[in-house]
Image (tube, rainbow, N blue to C red):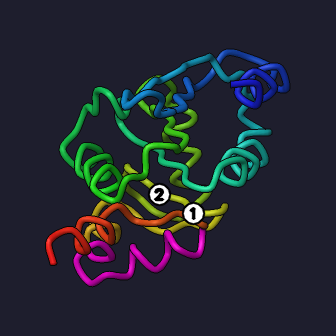
Amino acid sequence: MLSLIRSGAQCLRSGASAYLSRQAEGRVWTASARLLCSAPGLQKELGEMVRKDKVVVFMKGTPAQPMCGFSNAVVQILRMHGVDDYAAYNVLDDQDLRQGVKDFSNWPTIPQVYFNGEFVGGCDILLQMHQNGDLVEELKKLGIRSALLDAEKESK
């Protein structure tokens, strides 16, 4: 939460809402705060945003209330792998952010997923990685153990 407040304090004008999901006592908590971003500094700010957390998702809506099927699919895939600790930014709250992230990644659609500051792709890419097992390996590189590995052990 402190890093979210710092991000907001660094910016210049009202902009995107940031949502940080944290799991505590079996419940997912979502905190939000207005980020203050200037259009010329948006690309720099986006670079900082994607590097701040291991997993970052730019989506329509929030993890608790996705506003499109593709954003919901990304949230569900991450949830299946037990990834609840990630930053999610609602692009519907700020058109500059919505277009800025597309320009930043050179990817035309939302949602967009980043691991350790690197652009992974959208819903289609994350779904493909989930289906072929690459997502488990990528999460392992982040120090995140996929919950599917535990579920696989239990079924044997």
Find residue 150 and report its horizontal and vertical position in percent.
32, 66
- Residue 146 on the magenta segment: no
- Asked which secondary structure carries label 1, the reply is strand
Q: Quadrant of residue 41?
A: top right
* Residue neighbourhood size for the residue with mark 1, other residues' Cα within 10 Å, grouped as few (<14), some (14–19), many (≥20): many
Give yes or no for contact between labels 1 and 2 (Cβ–Cβ under 8 Å): yes
Image point 55% across, 66% down: which residue? 119
Number of marks in picture: 2
Which dot, 1 or 2, sits closer to the camera? Answer: 1
**CA–CA distance in space, label 1 to label 2:** 7 Å
For this orientation, the residue located farthest to the right is 10
Which quadrant of the rendered structure holds the N terminus?
top right
Q: Nearer the viewer, residue 46 or 96?
A: 46
* Residue neighbourhood size for the residue with mark 2, other residues' Cα within 10 Å, grouped as few (<14), some (14–19), many (≥20): many
Which quadrant of the rendered structure holds the C terminus?
bottom left
For this orientation, the residue located farthest to the left is 155
Instruction: Name the residue type under label 2.
Output: Val
Find residue 50 and report its horizontal and vertical position in percent.
65, 52
Q: Nearer the viewer, residue 12 or 69?
A: 69
Image point 26% across, 68% down: which residue? 127
Which label belongs to residue 113?
2
- Asked which secondary structure carries label 2, the reply is strand
Find residue 21 and report its horizontal and vertical position in percent.
49, 33
Give the magenta part as a residue range: 128-142
The residue pinned by badge 1 equals 115
Q: Quadrant of residue 28?
A: top left
Which label belongs to residue 49?
none
Instruction: Name the residue type under label 1.
Output: Phe
Find residue 67 and report its horizontal and vertical position in percent.
25, 31
Q: In this rendering, would 104 be left or right of 124?
A: right
Image point 55% across, 40% down: which residue? 87
